[in-house]
Image: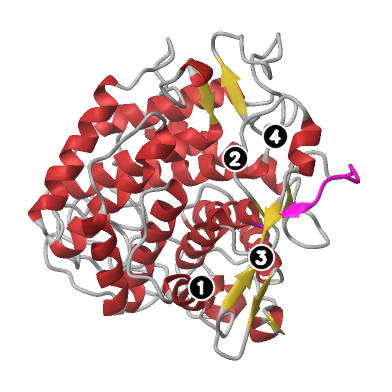
Amino acid sequence: MATGGASGGIVGSSSAPGGAAGGGKTGGTAGSSAPGGAAGGGKTGGAAGSSAPGGASGGGKTGGAAGSSAAGGTTEGGGTAGAAGSGAGGSALIGGPGPASQLGFDWGKAVIDTEIAGKTSLGVTYPEGLKLHGIYMAYKRLKDPKYLTFITTSVDSWGATAFVSLDDLMHNAVLADAYELTQKASYKTTADSVRKIYDTFPKTADGAFWHANRTDRAHQLWGDGTFMSLSVLTRYAMVFNDPTVYPIAVTNLTVTATHLKNPATGLFWHAYDESGVATWSKTASKTNEISWGRAMGWYVVACVMTLEMLPANDPGRAQVETILKDLITALAKHQDPATGRWFQVVDMESDTRNWTETSCSMMYSYATWWSYQHGLVDASFADVAKKGLNGVIQKMTKNASNQTTIATIVTGLNASGAVADYFSHPTATNDQHGVGAFIVMWEGMQ
């Protein structure tokens, strides 16, 4: 098996504001200037934005060829609201091709093609939902018809949503993706019914969704759960123009941050129990006081999706930007200088039981790059993101047929009060938690 690093090499960096990594172009020529249209700049958005008030400032970031993200705008796929990379606020992106586009091999396409080979669809688990959302992002860039067919066949195969936890609902984010691309009415009908679930889903006293509506998860907030709920809600709001989602998303992110943030490090602990009765709940914080890598990964991606949704003038936007900036800054301090990756328990780097985990490294690299592009952090963080991307690539291999493997992905785990449980938890190659995270990272760093 050829190692992944050989295909691309280390991406360059640029410290000049707006400069392109590795000396690439700073942005493309502006696209359409028609009202409500998207201006498509370089691969990450380019110089020009939408000419419509509140429109997206560039094509292709995480939403592909962006339409206006003002209410009633259109996307390339014909949706009712733009799935714009830069969000409804219309803030300008720092231009230039992203580091993923400079590696000389399209790892994202290879990972997707490996994943879907011999399959016609994916099911309703949240890792499958994440993979499908990543395939949606890739379709926006590549326009490969088999990706669209795979998305729609998957959605068409789903039955009615059965749910207890937020995890059970996440795949429904793809309903909005599929509707945006096809305008099929049944996707909106189903998405509308899922949206109503969140109106009655149980919450903590300060307004954040419980991780699950069952006895052993009652009153609990997990970093994981912010993504499981907000991925669905933010995509719904963007495609179907539902501003009632805005305060819900902001509340969930801010309340979760209030309870999970470790004041000593700025990192987040994995889980919080409002009732304080969970076996892992520490008396003072009511959390498990363990900073697990992937939980924070889910959280930062939820922040990104929320900021892509929120208008520039939304009263909660500044709060979310500050939370994301502070967490990205804290995470950068714990990046392994040798590999560019992050550890399974992020702030216990020196413990010999610890090891660098690939899926959280994907999510942090993506969210760090996004934060740099949107001006939340300075140019030094572009290098953090690039180093993280390269660290992930070093965990990948491909054979002569471009079938890929991704190593050292931690399998799914529950909150625990014993750090040894996190250190000893098994990893797997091509574990589905990492495959979707990789696709999202790859597309987001184009």
Q: Which mark is residue 392?
A: 3
**Label 3 sits on what residue type?**
Val
Closer to the camera, 143 or 219?
219
Q: Which residue carries the number 4 mark?
A: 291
Q: Which residue carries the number 1 mark?
A: 111
- The answer for how far apart the CA atoms under marks 1 and 2 are is 24 Å
Q: Earlier in the sequence, mark 2 or mark 3?
A: 2
Q: Is residue 241 visible?
A: no
Position in image of residue 356 (x %, y %): 76, 54
Q: Determine whether label 2 and label 3 are within 8 Å by CB.
A: no
Chief secondary structure of the magenta span?
loop
Q: Earlier in the sequence, mark 4 or mark 2?
A: 4
Q: Which mark is residue 140?
A: none
Magenta range: 350-358
Which of the two marks, 1 or 2, is nearer to us in this view?
1
Q: Earlier in the sequence, mark 1 or mark 3?
A: 1
Q: Dot 1, crowdedness within 10 Å: few (<14), some or many (≥20)?
A: many
Q: Residue at x 35, y 58 (%)?
A: 85
| Residue sitting at the far left | 185
Q: Quadrant of residue 86?
A: bottom left
- The image shows residue 402, relative to residue 424, as above or below, that is below
Q: What secondary structure is marked by label 2? A: helix
Q: Which residue carries the number 2 mark?
A: 296
Which of the two marks, 4 or 1, is nearer to us in this view?
1
Q: Dot 4, crowdedness within 10 Å: few (<14), some or many (≥20)?
A: many
Position in image of residue 184 (x %, y %): 11, 58
Q: Determine whether label 4 and label 1 are within 8 Å by CB.
A: no
**Label 4 sits on what residue type?**
Ser
Q: Determine whether label 4 and label 2 are within 8 Å by CB.
A: yes
Q: Residue at x 44, y 14 (%)?
A: 204
Q: What secondary structure is marked by label 1? A: helix
Q: Quadrant of residue 162?
A: top left
